[in-house]
């Protein structure tokens, strides 16, 4: 069964969220979903961009003003 | 997985200054509006810490702060936001389709506001150090992480020099690779003078990047002197590329007209070559790519879409209606010949009230309806039968011809 993992990156500035995302995704299986919680706008530029470039499916929810969840479905 | 389908009046692709302004205008015109943005709402302007030339902010403003205000204003007018990337579009016909990973959005009009993305050098090793590995395009994002370090900036335009100066507030040393001869830069004179006298900035003239080198992270950028081909290795903690931008137009290839660089061609109403599709901001082929001009484009497109949708409504429900026969009088209010015929049309309209639908289209106000009917000459009468164009009368428009046309 595919699982969903939450990665808390609240309060963390670039490049920390992206490094954490890369490491967390390595540990997941294909089909699993990683939800990265961020509140630094800089991470909104590189985390989704990087994940898409790697070929994963990405969607973002704005949960609050200046708070986002980047939802990454691991595809490979 | 079955994709869900959602319907909108207008879908805007891209949430930078241009898309957000178009959203404000469409939302305020009470159009059902969706804006799709694949990363941070605000676009490229959020990459800079200081915007000093956008009117209304005499003390200057941050890119992020300014775009936040745009975003709030668009939300206030009821624009829906979806944060995902548009994978493909189908722009033919009356109803356009915009497809994302999970959904297909159907819209009567589409505004392309996809802006630009930073250009890469194409040098050896570049791919391996993108994202968090040492190559950056955003000083605001990565400046703090370079506190006390040495960074290289590639480029000498406004963005390169202004962002380079911003980086000196954090980094110990900012080395700038400039393509041109000593003392020559592409930026404005004020920035140039400031940069040349900034003690933390150093310049390496006549150079391009030859190679990016490092283990996990970038360690050295090898520059090449283009005059004598000598290689100059520079040890850095980060490298910032500011060598221009490329348009985000891959998904429109073969559909929308573009110039050789891939920028979309529009007219002054922001219309592209496809009916109902508009383009705004940096993605357009235009003279000056700035926030102020992106805003102007967005306003025009919002207004154009409103007119286009109103015209579609008239075209479908009044002109091409099939309840009764119709005639359309295409005229130009400034043309005397057209004006002379007007009483005749109005008499006809009165005589046949409830039997024939008469529509007068003044092409001086807008050529949109004439284009939809394929007419480029006035005065002209088009007769409609069973919801289709029956006859086009250009010569000898008179009472007898009109009477005969109802047949
Ligand atoms: C470092 C720097 C400094 C600058 N300084 C100034 C300045 O001082 N003053 C000034 O006026 N201008 C400045 N500019 C220029 C200004 O940022 C641009 O002119 C402006 O951002 C253009 O707005 P836009 O809406 O056309 O495009 P963009 O801002 O590029 O926005 C386009 C948006 O579309 C999104 N997008 C693209 N493709 C898709 C897709 N397939 N699906 C979903 N979304 C998509 C992108 O993610 C992006 O957010 C600067 C630019 C940079 C990079």
Image (cartoon, grey):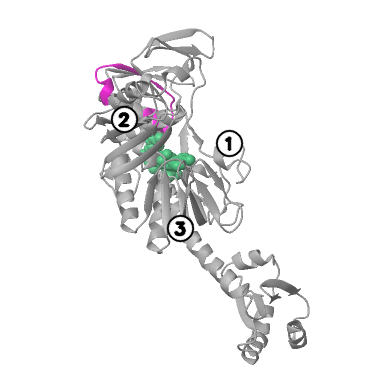
Mark pair 3, 1: CA separation: 26 Å
Label 3 residue near ligand 1, CB within 8 Å: no
Q: Is residue B176 visible?
A: yes
Q: Chain of mark 3?
A: B
Question: Residue under mark 1: which chain is it in?
Answer: B
**Mark 2 and mark 1: Cα distance apart in space:** 28 Å
Cα–Cα gap, marks 3 and 2:
31 Å
Location of mark 1 (residue):
B261
**Numbered disc in front, either 3 or 1:** 3
**Looking at the image, which residue is at 26% across and 41% down?**
A66
Chain name for mark 2: B
Looking at the image, residue A14 lies above or below residue B150: below
The picture places residue B176, in percent across and down from the top left corner, at 39, 20
At horizontal 62% and vertical 90% (from top left) the residue drawn is B350
Q: What residue is rendered at 45% in x and 40% in y? A: B85
Q: Is residue B74 left or right of residue B206?
A: left
Residue nearest the observer in this picture, B325 or B363: B325
Front-most of residues B32 and B308 = B32
Q: Which residue is mark 3?
A: B302
Tags 3 and 1 touching, CB below 8 Å: no
């Amino acid at each position: 069964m595919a699982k969903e993992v939450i990665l808390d990156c609240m309060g963390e500035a670039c490049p920390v969220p992206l490094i954490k995302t890369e490491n967390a995704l390595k540990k997941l299986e294909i089909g699993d979903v990683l939800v990265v919680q961020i509140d630094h706008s800089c991470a909104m530029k590189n985390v989704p961009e990087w994940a898409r470039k790697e070929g994963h499916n990405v969607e973002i929810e704005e949960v609050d003003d200046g708070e986002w969840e980047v939802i990454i479905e691991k595809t490979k | 997985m079955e994709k869900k389908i959602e319907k909108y009046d207008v879908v805007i692709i891209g949430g930078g200054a241009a898309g957000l302004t178009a959203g404000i205008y469409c939302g305020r015109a009470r159009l059902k509006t969706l804006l799709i943005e694949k990363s941070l709402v605000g676009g490229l302007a959020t990459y800079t810490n200081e915007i000093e030339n956008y009117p209304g902010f005499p003390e200057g403003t941050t890119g992020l702060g300014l775009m936040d205000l745009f975003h709030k204003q668009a939300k206030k007018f009821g624009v829906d936001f979806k944060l995902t990337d548009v994978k493909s579009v189908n722009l033919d016909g009356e109803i356009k389709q915009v497809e994302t990973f999970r959904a297909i959005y159907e819209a009567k009009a589409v505004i392309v506001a996809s802006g630009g993305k930073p250009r890469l050098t194409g040098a050896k090793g570049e791919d391996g150090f993108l994202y968090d590995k040492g190559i950056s395009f955003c000083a605001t994002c990565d400046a703090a992480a370079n506190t006390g370090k040495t960074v290289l900036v590639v480029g000498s335009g406004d963005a390169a020099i202004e962002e380079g100066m911003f980086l000196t507030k954090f980094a110990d040393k900012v080395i700038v690779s400039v393509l041109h001869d000593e003392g020559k830069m592409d930026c404005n004179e004020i920035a140039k003078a400031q940069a040349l006298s900034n003690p933390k900035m150093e310049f390496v003239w006549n150079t391009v990047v030859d190679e990016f080198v490092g283990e996990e992270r970038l360690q050295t950028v090898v520059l090449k002197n283009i005059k004598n081909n000598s290689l100059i290795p520079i040890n850095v903690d980060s490298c910032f590329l500011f060598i221009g931008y490329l348009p985000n137009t891959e998904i429109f290839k073969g559909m929308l007209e573009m110039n050789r660089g891939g920028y979309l061609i529009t007219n002054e109403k922001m219309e592209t070559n496809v009916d109902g599709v508009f383009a705004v901001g940096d993605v357009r082929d235009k003279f000056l790519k700035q926030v102020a001009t992106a805003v102007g484009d967005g306003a025009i497109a919002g207004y154009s879409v409103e007119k286009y949708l109103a015209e579609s409504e008239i075209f479908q429900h009044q002109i091409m209606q099939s309840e009764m026969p119709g005639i359309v009088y295409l005229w130009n209010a400034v043309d005397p010949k057209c004006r002379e015929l007007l009483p005749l049309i109005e008499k006809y309209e009165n005589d046949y009230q409830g039997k024939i639908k008469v529509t007068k289209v003044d092409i001086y106000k807008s050529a949109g309806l004439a284009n939809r009917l394929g007419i480029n000459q006035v005065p002209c009468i088009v007769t409609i039968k069973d919801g289709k164009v029956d006859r086009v009368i250009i010569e000898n428009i008179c009472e007898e011809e009109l009477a005969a046309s109802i047949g």
